[in-house]
Image (cartoon, rainbow, N blue to C red):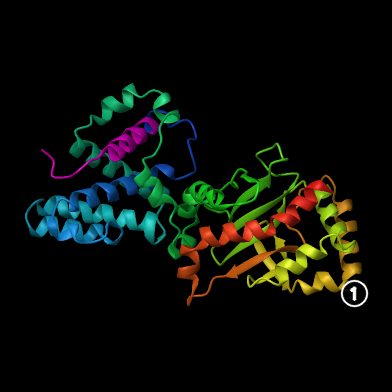
Amino acid sequence: MSVFVFDKDSTDTIRYLLAMKHFSEYTIGPQGIDLQLCALTLERVLIQTGLNYPKFQKEKQSDLKIFDIVKFLSQKNIVNSSVANQLFEYINFHDSIIRTGAKITNEVAHTMASQILRFLCAEAGISMEKEIQEAAFEDITNHKIGQSLKNEAFEVEEADFDNLNRLHYKSAQIQNEILKKLTVPLKPAKVSGFTPYTGGIILPFITEQVSSKRPSDCAYLGVTFTPNSIRIGLDFGAQAHKSIVKYYELIINGALTCEIETLSRKAADYCFCDTYWYYHTRNLQSLQWGLTMYGSTRLAIENVIEETKQSEGTALSGHRYLIGKVIQRRPEDFTYIAKGIINDAARNLNELYPILELIDKS
């Protein structure tokens, strides 16, 4: 009998991973989800095993270190040194995928994940080959990751910003948690696509009036993550030329003055900024710039209106004079900002919603 503890969440996820192997010719879920789930399942099994012993029952589950659990099991001869060394190697893989974002080749990562999955199957009494052979596509489409794994997936940590693959894996759950805290009629749109070479992640929210789940031709409010910053604010799809022009015209005509004044009075550091190559920001300036409407301000907006109209039919990779909030990554406070980003983002989106509503109605 195995010394390791497997609850239903763990065994269900193991079977899900085996079904993914059976249908490996299909692209299922975000890139690298199999590596993430394999590492998280190993973590869960080790933590559940540790909780069997008084030494770890006194600690909060979130504070448990799986390295310490394996070390304890080895010292007490609950597992032999060969198994312990094997587990320490697996923990290094876990940390590179989940915690540190250390560089690891795709081939090595999948080889290690397969070894871990085989180990988990053997300890759980699951026939790996039989499960793979008999897997049905419904095993994937009907699978729901257990609440414990989902909870792990959406807690945001500063280390996630060093590993956007990990952060992208959490994105759908982060978006869902933000949605729960909104008090305005927004709905989630599809999270931006992601590859290991993508520079950022966008979590978009659209008004109820928008029918498409992909905000390519409309205005939206978004939460954008890059390794160096977070931006929460107004944004537009790559083909949203008409909506962008409407936004600029609302600024020039003074139709957004009340909303901008309200935002400027809040202690939230709202500003105008430009975006380039989808995720990145520059040219941050005070909201007062859009309230004074000096001749130079009006001319600048009129010029960008003309540029936008002339680019009709061409995909836009950046926008000018977007209202929002930009949080730069600084070592002294980003740890706390990351942990509180769900609550902060929801509050900011609630405050920015009136601007999006006016754009959609104009």
x, y percentage for residue 139?
39, 27
At 77% from the left and 69% from the top, the residue drawn is 261
Q: Residue at x 71, y 67 (%)?
A: 263
Q: In the image, what residue occupies the spot 53% across and 49% down?
A: 180
198, 265: nearer the viewer: 265
| 172 relative position to 39: left or right | right
Is residue 293 shown in magenta?
no
Q: Position of residue 241 (x, y in %)?
A: 82, 49
- The residue lying toward the viewer, choosing from 142 and 89, is 142
Q: Which residues are magenta?
A: 1-20
Count of picture labels? 1
- At which x and y percent is residue 1? 10, 38
Q: Quadrant of residue 355?
A: bottom right
Please tell me which residue lies in front, 220 or 15: 220
In this picture, residue 274 sits left or right of residue 197: right
- Picture coordinates of residue 26, whole percent (x, y): 48, 31
Question: Are there few (<14), some (14-19), or many (20+) residues within 10 Å of tag 1?
Answer: few
What is the secondary structure assignment of the residue under circle 1? loop
- Pointer 1 residue: 294
In this rendering, the answer to whether 62 lies above or below 153 is below
Q: Nearer the viewer, residue 101 or 49?
A: 49
Name the kind of residue labelled 1 in the image: Tyr
Residue farthest along the left direction in this orientation: 77
